[in-house]
Image: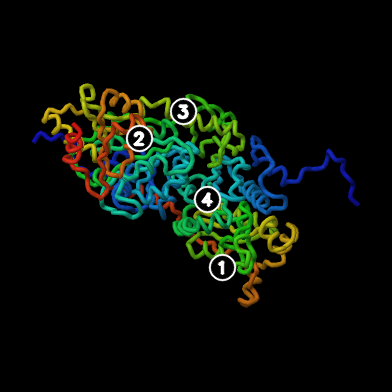
Amino acid sequence: MTTEPSARLMQGDAACAEGAIAAGCYFFAGYPITPATEIAEVLARRLPQVGGRFIQMEDEIASIAAVIGAAVGGAKAMTATSGPGLSLMQENIGYAAMTEIPCVIVDVQRLGPSTGRPTSPSQGDVMAARWGAHGDHPIIALCPSSVRETFDLTVQAFNFAELYRTPVILLLDEVIGHMRERVTLPSPEEIELVERPSTTVPPEWYKPYENFPADVPPLMPFGTGYRYHITGLHHDERGYPTNRSDEVQPWLDRIFRKIERSLSEILLYDADGIENAETLIIAYGATARSARYAVEKARKRGREVGFLALKTLWPFPEEVVEHAAARLHRVVVPEMNMGQIALEVERVIGRHKVRRVNRADGEMIQPAQILAAIEEWA
Amino acid sequence: MTTKQPFNKVKTPRESRVHERYLRHSKKFPNVWCAGCGIGIVMGSIIRAIDDLQLDKNDIAMISGIGCTGRMPVYVDFNTMHTTHGRALAFATGLKMVRPEMKIIVVMGDGDALAIGGNHFIHAARRNIGLTTIVVNNTTYGMTGGQYSPTTPTDAIASTAPYGHIEQPFPIAELAAVSGAAFVARSTVYHVRELEKYIAQAIEKEGFTVVEAVSYCHTTLGRINRWGTAPDMMRRLKEQSVTRRQADGMSEEEKQGLIVRGVFVDRAVPEYTQLYDHIIERAEAEVA
């Protein structure tokens, strides 16, 4: 047997839970929902083992609220849900964006809308992750396509949340969440962890929403001597409510800028064979697996096919897509919805260059469907 | 005979000195509340209760939801959070889980606590998590202009009940009691010393504690119903309330429409975060 000792068979949801532990998650609040329940089940067992805390709340609204409350107390905190729960959480996700409280929201997507098909996969929450909460705000959303990547991106989600003081949504889908794969998890030394910006200024000088330093002001936990106010109202640098337009717009500009200036760190993707490609496939999540298979098949048939697998969906990697598709006239975007990321791709490179491959019936997109789109067009 | 003191020698009343110590100096006053509102009285009572208990400001968090009462935290010099409508208890639950040593006071209005936040209210009580909840019950949605709330009296007129209110009100203290709270009391903004005492008891007590502070809204519901000015409504609180002992000797009919004041529950129930510490011990033992 040559199997390394740490290799094991693991479910996507469990990898997400282990990723959270590895990232230093101290608090989880959630409400049972298929296909995300396993994340809560694993963390109910695992968190107290490492001195952390788990609670099952009365609904998803309470879950995200408790997560934000815990984050204000200084904890790295996470919740996990599926589409119906994500809909319920939206107001408080907006609150986290408004108050710049770091937190991680895992959405294991199932077929919607409404109750839909709870045990069937979908990628129908991509736009809900971006625009679900009312009002203008930036958001980061990550999307893994394997069990190992689920572990890695969960760690990454915590790092981004803490580093940029923002809610981060991790978009799994039912296939990734419930799939079991052989994985070798990294050792703790291999995992890079990030702590939220902190300060040593005297408490009376502390301003939780000051534009300093580098657009992400330090966030001091409650109970550490830094007494200040947090509100979902528009607020000034001290956190007190304001009706002054000259305080609101600079704040809004700053929370967008803090994400935009770090795009090179935030935008994660795998690009392959872009240089000589005649056709480009852009895919993410479980669909990226079908796409990768289709790309290999097409290449064997002599087609020059490039492949862009997106891991960061929001902010949308505009320049990456623009650059990859610059010399091409054919871009195929397969996704398990009626066309959501395709809207972004079309916005960036123009509608005439894009062919959508959509399926929203609870089944995965088959490689043959993607292949057919490549062939038809060639 | 009393001798008149010169103006600059007049001793500042204890209340002012105490309030001064706990109000934020960096926040621009005045506050958002209408002149004559009872919410400020509740805020004063909370401050004096905290002063009596000699608590460190750094260890206190005040968390609120939305509405007139939701604006209270911004004025006080604690760790303060003004959250979303109805969800203050859920936010506070998360904070308590990771900072169990903190004294967390949740202030909500009746609409915030019992309509949109009703589910969180009963579940926080059921868990008996260590939060002190002060519900300022003014029996209406004041900030939005006098719509009927879960505690509006039947037959009252509200801006959304122009033909009379046909629903029955929630008894907040009784609801908290049957939901599992460790300490439940009710008083009014007229009975300030009593209110202050109950709030101090609630903050000191381990577990989920509730103080219902019955107030009024003279600018919305009071005006619509022609219940008079703020002093008139304050007088109603005095005249229409009885102590629990007085109420015990009354028939159900006699108690109709009266506010019963007093401590309803004071029991020893294990507090949630302390129980969770045992969970951690068990889990750590399992791995070791």
Chain of residue at mark 3: A
Quarter holding residue A326? top left
Sequence-first tag of 1 and 4: 4
Chain of residue at mark 2: A
Marks 3 and 4 in Cβ contact (< 8 Å): no
Q: Amino acid at mark 1?
A: Glu
Say whether mark 2 and mark 3 are on the same chain: yes
Q: In terms of secondary structure, where does tag 4 sit?
A: loop
Pointer 3 residue:
A257
Residue located 37% across and 48% down the image: A54
Residue reaching furthest left? Answer: A1
Residue B182 image point, x, y percent: 51, 59
Residue A47 image point, x, y percent: 34, 44
Say whether mark 4 and mark 2 are on the same chain: no
Q: Which mark is residue B85?
A: 4
The CA span between labels 1 and 3 is: 50 Å
Closest to the camera, between mark 3 and mark 4, is 3
Observer-nearest residue: B55 or A186? A186
Q: Amino acid at mark 4?
A: His
Please tell me how crowded label 3 is: few (under 14), some (14-19), or many (20+) other residues with Cα within 10 Å.
some
Closest to the camera, between mark 2 and mark 4, is 2
The CA span between labels 1 and 2 is: 49 Å
Q: Which mark is residue A344?
A: 2
Pointer 1 residue:
B167
